[in-house]
Amino acid sequence: MKRSGSDNSSKVATDVDEKEGKMSKKSRNTLFILFFSLVLDLLGFTVILPLMPSILEYYGRSDGQDGLYGRLLAAVDGFRDFIGAPQTQKFNIVLFGGLLGSLFSFLQFVASPLIGSLSDVYGRRAIMITTMVGVVMSYVLWAVSYSFPVFIVARIVGGISKGNVSLSAAIVTDITTPAHRSKGMAAIAIAFCLGFLFGPTIGAMFSILGSTSEAQSYSIFQYPALFSLCMAAGDVLLIYALLPETLPSNRRAKSLGYGVKSALQLINPVSLFRFDAMSKITKLDRQNLQVMGVAYFLYLLLFSGLEYSLTFLCHQVFNYTSIQQGKMFLFIGVVMTLVQGGYVRRRPSGSEKQTALQGMLLLMPGMFIIGRASSIIMLYVGLVLFSFGAGTVVPSMTSLTSEFGEGDEKGKVMGIFRSLGALARALGPTVACAVYWRYGAEICYSFGAMLMLVPLFIFSFVERPVAHR
């Protein structure tokens, strides 16, 4: 019997029942395994989110002002003074956490196209296992991060290794036809929502456990790190045992040199936006990818910044506690899950552009309302529109992007797309913080809403690939 990762297992991966127009059983099984794998991964990845303030406070006590923590905190203080943010412990921690989040996103920007290109050469399964082993190692380092430098190394290893999202999108492209691709991308988005719904909740439970321990106890990070380690290790076993290879050897890029050379071009942001590494697409398709890449980058730059500044707004305007903010983000996650599971996945093939444009249109009034909210009801009305738009734009853009490129460049194009998003998420919070603290919430959100017209206008010019028209 051939193992599940053999090329033979993928020969019928994209079979469709011609009579019923449904995905084949093998494709559905692969999609289910991929969905469950992402849920495991994201549970481990998001458990740290509500713990970050307590973890940083712990390192502030243990590392001291002369260590790496103290030097980075001084840099954050300088940035805080520059943008006019108030000198409070809560805001200092949020800014510091944003700095670490930007570091993680920047590493994704560098690593994603390389990981995608390697998957075009060696197959999705092998590279997926390799990257997940890297994630496991990052959690091992986190579990023993008694000093702040070790914690930073753990985050660096995790950021470089986190390639399973773009790989998952490439796998969905491998196993689905254009008619079913949006449903596959919606499944990835739903896995994201579930991970971000339950992972932080589990992290909050660990924070309660840590609060009952001694002030200097390592339990604030050891228990959640071990939980994340178990999730990642289980994910590796799941992928190794059950996930088939979806890119047969006859559809792969010919050599490592071809893949790596193309990926290294993308360290240059100009080359990244031009999709220079894509060598097997028509001039018109390349132009469409370039337009979509700019629209996606600008959209996520605005969205990630305003999403990040919600923490400041709710604390400043409504005096929200951390628990109340957790409930707010839980509400956003529930709405996004319902939208992606009940609306996006039921949208017909070919409607991705329209769905994304509608999402951006809904985000704009949502931002206006949030920025001017003077009551909880008004805030949540804005959050509904904000969440509905957020739940449609990225899955639709991702599905449309996956239609570009040959089979041996699918991993590359999804890696480029993921990299653009990571660069936007690295820059967005910093830009939004500067605008928020200098000009206030109303101007920040109103200006962001108006600027959303720019990616909306740019994306309106995108057309599907020539082969799918």
Image (spheres, rainbow, N blue to C red):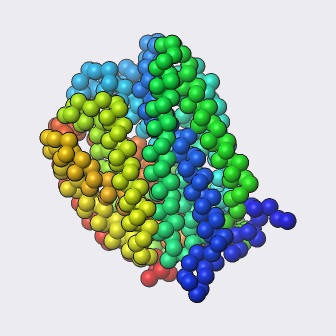
Q: Residue visible at 75% across and 62% down?
A: 4
Asked whether residue 263 appears in the rendered view, the answer is no
Above/below status of 122 relative to 151:
below
Residue at the outermost bottom position: 19
Quadrant housing residue 284: bottom left
Q: Residue visible at 76% across and 71% down?
A: 8
What is the x, y in percent for residue 219? Answer: 55, 21
Q: Is residue 241 left or right of residue 272?
A: right
Q: Residue visible at 64% across and 64% down?
A: 30
Compare residues 284 and 456 and report the one nearer the observer: 456
Quadrant housing residue 325: top left
Compare residues 395 and 204 and report the one nearer the observer: 204
What is the x, y in percent for residue 277? Answer: 54, 62
Q: Quadrant of the C terminus?
A: bottom left
Compare residues 76 and 356 and report the one nearer the observer: 356
Q: Residue visible at 46% across and 20% down?
A: 211
Above/below status of 120 relative to 176:
above
Residue at the outermost right position: 1
Q: Is residue 272 left or right of residue 7?
A: left
Q: Quadrant of the N terminus?
A: bottom right
What is the x, y in percent for residue 41? Answer: 57, 46
What is the x, y in percent for residue 412? Answer: 56, 60
Asked whether residue 219 appears in the rendered view, the answer is yes
Above/below status of 451 relative to 217:
below
Numbered circles on residues, count: 0
Q: Is residue 128 left or right of residue 191?
A: right
